[in-house]
Image (spheres, helix red, strand yellow):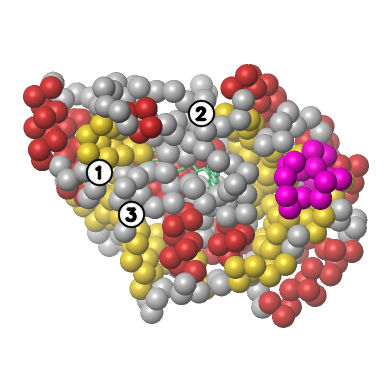
Amino acid sequence: MEAKIEELKSRINGRVILPQDRDYDEARKIYNAMIDKYPGIILKCRDKEDVIQAVNFGRENGLEASIRSGGHNGAGLALCEDGVVIDLSEMKNIEIDSREKTAVIFPGNTLADIDKATHEFGLALPSGIVGSTGIGGITLGGGIGYLSRKGGLTVDNLVEAEVVLASGELVTANESENSDLFWALRGGGGNFGVVVSFKFKLIEVKNVYAGPMFWPLDKAEEAIRFYDKTMKEASIDLYGFFAFLIVPPADPFPKELQMQKVCGVVWNYTGAMDKAEEIFRPIREFGPPILDYVSEIPMPALNGMFDLLYPSGMQWYWKAHYINELNDESISINIDFGSQIPTFHSTTHLYPIDGAVHSVAPGDTAWANRSARWVQVIVGVSPEAEDAKKITSWCRDYYDALKPHAGGGSYVNFMMVEEDDSVEASYGANFRRLGQIKKKYDPENFFHINQNIEPCS
Ligand SMILES: Cc1cc2nc3c(=O)[nH]c(=O)nc-3n(C[C@H](O)[C@H](O)[C@H](O)COP(=O)(O)OP(=O)(O)OC[C@H]3O[C@@H](n4cnc5c(N)ncnc54)[C@H](O)[C@@H]3O)c2cc1C
């Protein structure tokens, strides 16, 4: 194997990192410190040709292969044990066509990189809410965030992808070329090949009227009902995710609120700024809120708002449900577990996925859940390794209690390594077609370190 690795090194533009190398431990670190895997080779790809070499090397030598973009995956699917990590994090080009309102984005970019680049042109890509998340994983699993109601999922804005298949062949996928692959990429995760460039359409968003608003926990029942009604009646310009949380012990939060358990909404209004005060008048009249940091800010300021609170290297355990409706019992379960949040980084968020997400039919992309109103993520987080058990059991118990009130399946980007049939359930009626497309493009299931879809007929 040593000779083969030497030969590989001579053929690539990027770097090969091996267990004996000084930067190996740094290179095998990912966002979730709960994951501690030891790959045999980490190939830091510089370009598409490197990716082709990495795929061929893995396949020809019978090695496991994982794909890493931002390294944010909670289950640690960016890494493998012993095999080869196809690390795309240094592939950072972004090309924006401001007239066409499109962007070609390489998979090493984070959401913060993309926000910064698009904001200059008054444009934005609907995607997630934390800047350090990688565009690769979030896109292929769906992509939900502050602009979902207005602009749909990240996958709904994908117009083309270039993909290195398990055979090592580089192909283009769009509505007219390899359209079955294009369909599968929009939600099917990293099952079909390594995406080496994404082309997205962008939407016009510059400044937004946005930020967090909190109410005391003893108002939680009224607050969640008020929120539910507000969102049901709101135009797609208003977005807000409901949360149970502990106010962080840090600026800019007032001292008297720090470490208090509260409920709240992080709002995002993208309509005309001169209408914002009027839209928020009835919202501000409810309660009243004990904290109101909603104001006009640039879109990237909203997207980066919680980045400092969630640096890389903490313990993460999470699970998610699709929620169609809130009912008396589920509200009471939420209040019960919301009152028992184990650490101040842990939280639950109800992310709206109605509005523009519902205007795409369930069979039009692999991402099937087009009638649920929310993805609810339950997330246990702590900087302390000794909290791992505590955050995991809170999360699992909360998830289990809500299960009878959930829509079935889960959002693949918020899954750990699951023991049940939740991958199949998550794709519902699209699962079989995904298996058939997998058989066409990756018949040997070379790309299986993911929320795996096995090849089928
Ligand atoms: C702090 C935090 C906040 C988050 N917020 C949101 C949010 O607001 N909205 C949301 O929808 N999700 C969110 N997520 C979940 C996120 O979408 C997933 O964790 C996603 O997997 C991260 O993508 P990545 O590229 O960083 O991950 P990685 O760990 O690098 O990759 C994860 C998997 O995606 C696949 N993959 C990645 N890149 C490629 C590629 N180029 N080609 C083929 N397959 C690829 C592979 O299977 C890989 O194993 C968040 C995660 C974290 C940790």
Number of marks drawn:
3
Residue holding disc 1: 45
Residue holding disc 2: 33
Question: At 39% across and 47% down in the image, what residue appears?
Answer: 136
Q: Is residue 112 above or below residue 13?
A: below
Q: Position of residue 404 (x, y in %)?
A: 70, 31
Name the element at disc 1: loop
Name the element at disc 3: loop
Circle 1 residues within 10 Å: few <14, some 14–19, many ≥20: many
Q: Does residue 224 show up?
A: no
Going by the image, does 382 lie left or right of 427? right
Q: Position of residue 279 (x, y in %)?
A: 77, 71
Q: Does residue 100 show up?
A: yes
Q: CA distance from mark 2 to mark 1?
A: 23 Å
Q: Nearer the N terminus, badge 3 or badge 2? A: 2
Q: Is residue 94 above or below residue 278?
A: above
Which span of residues is magenta-colored?
Answer: 247-265
Question: At 44% across and 57% down in the image, what residue appears?
Answer: 113
User: For the residue marked with disc 2, what is the amino acid?
Assistant: Ala
